[in-house]
Image: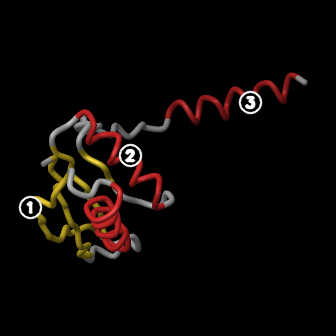
Amino acid sequence: MAEQKTEKKDKEEKVKSKPTEVIEKRKIPDNVIFVGKKPFMSYVNAVSYQLRENKQIEICARGKSISMAVDIAETLVKRFMKGQIEKGEITINSEAFDSREGNGRKVNVSTIKIILKKI
């Protein structure tokens, strides 16, 4: 029993002694929606809800989510909020990241920002 307790304490000390990585969290404005892996209608509802409180909204996506972001914007403009909102500025870009393999290579990921404005 005493050996088990000391082993647990050793493990706890090892966990505590590891350096912790501090990640800076940026404050994301309310009028920005990041598109990811959630269902399509979740984003449509989120954007329409945010447009009640804000004059304009930004839909942002990277990589494979770009097509969903475009579909969300088009669905809102042409169906759900027809005549209430319009498309504003659309910005396309790419961001460079370090490869996941850790071989020092840079990987480019496409990004899009679509601004929707109330009429």
Question: Who comes first in sequence, dot 2 or dot 1?
Answer: 2
Q: Residue at x 29, y 53 (%)?
A: 81
Give the residue at mark 3.
8
Give the residue at mark 2.
46
Q: Residue furthest front?
A: 83
Question: Who comes first in sequence, dot 1 or dot 3?
Answer: 3
Tell me if residue 17 comes above or below residue 96 in the rendering: above
Q: Is residue 34 or residue 11 the one in the foreground?
A: 34
The part of the image, by quadrant, that contains residue 27 is: top left
Give the residue at mark 1.
89
Q: Residue furthest left?
A: 89
Q: Is residue 11 left or right of residue 74?
A: right
Q: Residue at x 34, y 76 (%)?
A: 103
Tell me if residue 19 comes above or below residue 84 in the rendering: above
Q: Which amino acid, by three-letter code, is at mark 3?
A: Lys
CB under 8 Å between discs 1 and 3: no
10 Å neighbourhood of mark 3: few (<14), some, or many (≥20)? Answer: few
Q: Residue furthest right?
A: 1
Helix, strand or loop for disc 2: helix
Q: Is residue 58 or residue 64 the one in the foreground?
A: 58
Helix, strand or loop for disc 3: helix
Q: Is residue 71 left or right of residue 13?
A: left
Separation of disc 1 and disc 3 at Cα?
A: 57 Å
Question: Who comes first in sequence, dot 3 or dot 2?
Answer: 3
